[in-house]
Amino acid sequence: MKLLRVGTAGAERPALLDAEGVLRDLTGIVDDIDGALLGDAAALGRVRAAAEAGELPALDATGLRIGPPLGRIGKVVCIGLNYHDHARETGAEPPAEPVVFLKAADTVVGPNDTVLVPRGSVKTDWEVELAVVIGRTARYVADDEDPLAYVAGYAVAHDVSEREFQIERGGTWDKGKNCETFNPLGPWLVTADEVADPQDLALKLWVNGELKQDGTTAEQIFSVAEVVRYVSRFMVLYPGDVINTGTPAGVALGAPEPKPFLRAGDVVELEIPGLGRQRQEFKDA
């Protein structure tokens, strides 16, 4: 299923995109697309049954904002330097263990919402990523368990980053990752049954129409399954938590000088086939 949330910011309603591309209203079936729904197999079954029976009313998508496909996100866990090609372009050694940092849930915005260049920023950068959405509580996932059994679905994420804040201002990466609007998510939460192999997904990103990133999750240093297992050993993952699994080569940081960092007026588009496409205009904060 392709689950999404539509409407004005803070007042989104749950919806579903059917196989014919028609937007369907879920408000009569569920309250929201959130961890409570994703952790409730019976509720998801009711959504699926209603969709297959053709019982869901159509919504007019004209002018309707698409919000983040997930409400009440608990935490956003991010994996840094998780692509071989990205590590090479930035001159970094591939990490021996996953690099883990957090983004605040309030950085998450809709896939087509405006993204704000922070005040004083000169190094705002782009990163297309595969986001993993947790559907079952994952705590110390064992070696003989399948970590993908804990995944409810997948989405496109844009891990916007400010490199000066992240790298040159001391301390942790958090300052360069948690600026407002720095995590567009969506348009859809695609349930895991529609993604045959999360290590066989293409990722693309364009800036002002120019292709900048053209990668594949096959280049990940640590697979989605490895990441879920690893993170579960350091923190409990709950339904509705999100993991951004890293970005392939092609970011501004890895480009030759002068590096083409983002400015107000730039337009970024990104896509993972099957998971949807995003478009953001950048403006000054």
Image: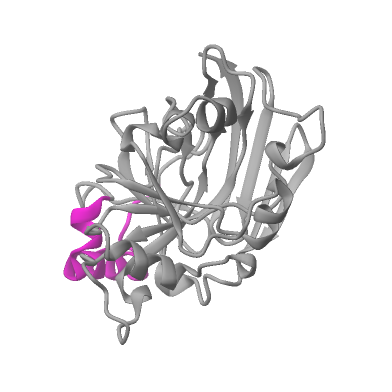
Q: State whether residue 29 appears in this view.
A: no
The structure's colour scheme is one colour
- Residue 280 in the image: x percent, y percent? 59, 31
Q: Quadrant of residue 178?
A: top left
Q: Residue at position x 69%, y 46% from top?
A: 90
Q: Residue at position x 58%, y 31% from top?
A: 163
Q: Residue at position x 21%, y 59% from top?
A: 236
Q: Residue at position x 55%, y 58% from top?
A: 82
In this rendering, the count of numbered labels is 0
- Residue 211 in the image: x percent, y percent? 78, 44
Farthest residue in the bottom direction?
A: 144
The reply, left or right, for residue 41 in relation to residue 128 is left
Q: Give the main secondary structure of the magenta stretch.
A: helix
Quadrant housing the N terminus: bottom left
Work out whether 224 lies above or below 167: below
Work out whether 120 lies above or below 24: above
Q: Which residues are magenta?
A: 34-58
Q: State whether residue 245 appears in this view.
A: yes
Q: Quadrant of residue 264?
A: top right
In front: 255, or 128? 255
Work out whether 66 lies above or below 164: below
The reply, left or right, for residue 197 in relation to residue 39 is right
Q: Is residue 56 magenta?
A: yes
- Residue 278 in the image: x percent, y percent? 58, 42
In front: 279, or 85? 85
Q: Is residue 129 magenta?
A: no
- Residue 56 in the image: x percent, y percent? 32, 56
